[in-house]
Amino acid sequence: MRPDKTALTRRRLPPGVHAVNEGLAFVLELLALGALAWWGADAGGGLAPKIVLGAGAPVLAAVTWGLFAAPRARFRVPLAAVLVVKAIVFGLAAVALAATGRAGLAIAFAAVVVLNTALATVDRDAIRRGAGTPAR
């Protein structure tokens, strides 16, 4: 169910900030997949493990995200479960960055993810309360 126009005006974030935050969320999701691929390619001992981990880690994360955390997820789960999936995927991506020797980048990534997710959650919750639909 799509929120009506009245619900959209109940956002906590101004429209421009909302758009930027949603765009940033997408970029962060892509960066998480890239970090997992980078870690996998770096962690593998030989060529085969590098390929398996480099491709497998981001694919596993993307499938999990698509099943439970995406806006059009296959399974509709409560917001708390969505946030747990996001915390696991983004957390593993930050750990992957740290494991490749990029601790500063891992900390910066995690900080931006926390801020972005908090803003998106508050904004989507305001819409949900205004439209009577579940927040995602």
Image (cartoon, rainbow, N blue to C red):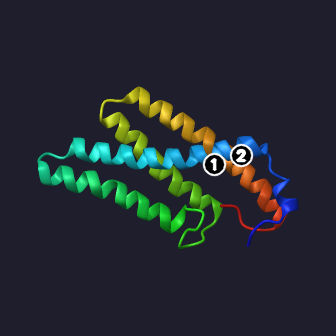
Q: Quadrant of the N terminus?
A: bottom right
Q: Is residue 71 left or right of residue 54?
A: right
Q: Residue at x 84, y 60 (%)?
A: 7
Q: Residue at x 43, y 34 (%)?
A: 106
Say which element carries label 2: helix
Along the line of sight, which residue is nearer the eye, 87 or 40? 40
Q: Residue at x 85, y 53 (%)?
A: 10
Residue 129 lies, in percent from the top left, at 82, 60
Q: Quadrant of residue 130?
A: bottom right
Q: Mark 2 belongs to which amino acid?
A: His
Residue 39 lies, in percent from the top left, at 29, 43
Q: To which residue does mark 2 refer?
A: 18
Query: Marks 2 and 1: CB-CB under 8 Å?
Result: yes
Residue 29 lies, in percent from the top left, at 49, 49
Q: Is residue 63 left or right of residue 37?
A: right
Q: Quadrant of residue 73?
A: bottom right
State the mark number for residue 123.
none
Q: Is residue 109 visible?
A: yes
Q: To which residue does mark 1 refer?
A: 22
Along the line of sight, which residue is nearer the eye, 40 or 79? 40
